């Protein structure tokens, strides 16, 4: 859109002529030197944000005001892409002291917003709409997606960020001592208990059929870190706790995927997806990385990892189906089922697009992801994912038997075999490249009107209490 056409749109929306003229005049045309560009681009992003802040709240805007906000967001995002294409490694080096410090995604975006004003939404901007319904949010977090996509697209910066997300969290280092003494820890959303040679990781969100949300994410990752650090256990078993839903009351449920009610009500931030899949899910698959080593797998880095078992009871929907793709062994009740209703949710199902075809082939994978196909665990197709079918009520005995079978000769070769399989199937750099695309596309999906329409049509989300 030309400057004159853009000016007309901003004038019609009611902005003062001097304000919108100064904003458009500040828009940089081509990137140059890093230090100078930080100042030039920051001025433009800040002026545009100031204009948007003068508009009414999103639900109260007129059509011309909506058009003006969309125009400003489009131009500022275009500028971000140009800036990051030229300077992404310089930005990352500035935020990590030239990669001498490991910074997780949730902290990296805060540092970026503070270091280069306007590049990413500020803490205040995000806090101002934290209580809004998802449909009423500005979409500030899309800029976080563009930023993280650019970081992950860079082999140098992206590998370093992926390694940062595979390090044990500081909280886990402290809790590992407690777990070693007592054999159990209880956190919000997850717990860990030692049973013989196994560390049993239980996810719990009883009211929501053990769905994942902000209340489960940190607890699950910290519990997994502790399980991997624990020297007295050799296997990690993931299982769902009993739920309170009338249909499944007091039954164990592996999990219902992302909490769609919380998603609709704006309680799932965009960063949740990256924290989850680059965090505990990737740790299940790759183990814990070490800060003093190179990145894992083909780059020579060592890891702390153990075989992981899933115990699927009742169902594994969405994100919980995704978890089965990083397990070393999957037990499933005969009457359980799995599904990946990504189309109905309007989001990308984690790394399933990359991993699922390895199990089921391309056609069945597409049917699951794009056409809501459901698989009964005791079916030929689901047995491509599930290793063993268990009669209802016999899961405890099955877990004990499988743990014994996997550990009775020791698990000395387990980590080596896991690494060898990963190098052939999903090298570290392939994972990085996948999540570069995922980071960008999921950001737009997360704020798509189609997501809201799907949640209202298929989930009746507008009538569910968060």
Image (tube, helix red, strand yellow):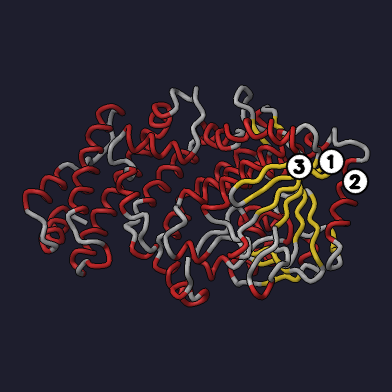
Q: Could you say which disc has been placed on residue 197 in the image?
A: 1
Q: Quick check: marks 2 and 1 in contact, CB under 8 Å?
A: yes
Question: Residue visible at 49% across and 32% down?
Answer: 103
Question: Residue visible at 30% across and 52% down?
Answer: 128
Helix, strand or loop status at disc 3: helix
Mark 3, residue position: 421
Q: Picture quarter containing residue 247?
A: bottom right
Instruction: Locate residue 29, reporting x and y percent.
Output: 23, 41
Name the one closer to the observer, 84 or 319.
319
**C-alpha gap between disc 1 and disc 3:** 24 Å
Question: Residue visible at 29% across and 54% down?
Answer: 74
Name the one closer to the observer, 108 or 12.
108
Instruction: Locate residue 164, reporting x and y percent.
Output: 55, 33
Q: Quadrant of the N terminus?
A: bottom left
**129 on left or right of 226:** left
**253 on left or right of 448:** right
Foreground: disc 1 or disc 3? 1
Q: Quick check: marks 1 and 3 in contact, CB under 8 Å?
A: no
**C-alpha gap between disc 2 and disc 1:** 8 Å
* One can see residue 318 in this view: no
């Amino acid at each position: 859109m030309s400057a004159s056409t853009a000016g007309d749109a901003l004038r019609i929306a009611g902005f003062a002529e001097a304000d919108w003229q100064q904003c458009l005049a500040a828009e940089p045309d081509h990137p140059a030197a890093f230090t100078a560009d930080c100042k030039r681009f920051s001025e433009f992003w800040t002026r545009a944000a100031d204009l948007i802040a003068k508009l009414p709240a999103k639900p109260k805007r007129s059509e011309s005001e909506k058009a003006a906000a969309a125009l400003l967001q489009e131009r500022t995002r275009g500028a971000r892409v140009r800036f990051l294409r030229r300077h992404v490694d310089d930005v990352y080096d500035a935020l990590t002291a030239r990669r001498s410090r490991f910074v997780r995604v949730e902290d990296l975006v805060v540092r970026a917003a503070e270091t280069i004003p306007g590049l990413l939404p500020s803490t205040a901007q995000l806090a101002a709409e934290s209580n809004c319904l998802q449909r009423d949010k500005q979409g500030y977090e899309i800029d976080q997606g563009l930023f993280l996509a650019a970081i992950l697209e860079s082999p140098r910066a992206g590998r370093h960020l992926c390694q940062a997300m595979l390090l044990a969290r500081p909280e886990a280092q402290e809790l590992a001592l407690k777990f070693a003494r007592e054999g159990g820890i209880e956190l919000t959303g997850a717990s860990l208990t030692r049973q013989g040679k196994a560390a049993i990781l239980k996810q719990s969100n009883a009211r929501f059929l053990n769905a994942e949300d902000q209340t489960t994410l940190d607890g699950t990752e910290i519990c997994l870190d502790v399980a991997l650090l624990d020297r007295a256990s050799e296997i990690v078993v993931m299982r769902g706790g009993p739920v309170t839903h009338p249909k499944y009351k007091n039954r164990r449920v592996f999990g219902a995927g992302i909490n769609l009610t919380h998603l609709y009500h704006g309680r799932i931030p965009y960063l949740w997806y990256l924290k989850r899949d680059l965090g505990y899910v990737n740790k299940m698959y790759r183990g814990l990385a070490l800060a003093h080593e190179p990145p894992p797998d083909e780059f020579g880095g060592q890891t702390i990892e153990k075989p992981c078992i899933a115990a699927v009871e009742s169902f594994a929907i969405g994100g919980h189906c995704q978890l089965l793709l990083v397990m070393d062994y999957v037990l499933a009740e005969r009457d359980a089922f799995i599904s990946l209703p990504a189309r109905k949710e309007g989001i990308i199902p984690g790394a399933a697009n990359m991993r699922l075809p390895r199990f089921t082939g391309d056609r069945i994978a597409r049917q699951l992801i794009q056409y809501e196909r459901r698989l009964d665990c005791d079916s030929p197709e689901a047995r491509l994912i599930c290793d063993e079918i268990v009669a209802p009520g016999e899961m405890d005995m099955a877990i004990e038997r499988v743990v014994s079978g996997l550990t009775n000769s020791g698990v000395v070769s387990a980590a080596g075999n896991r690494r060898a399989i990963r190098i052939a199937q999903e090298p570290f750099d392939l994972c990085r490249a996948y999540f570069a695309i995922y980071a960008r596309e999921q950001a737009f999906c997360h704020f798509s009107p189609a997501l809201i329409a799907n949640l209202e049509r298929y989930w009746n989300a507008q009538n569910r209490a968060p």
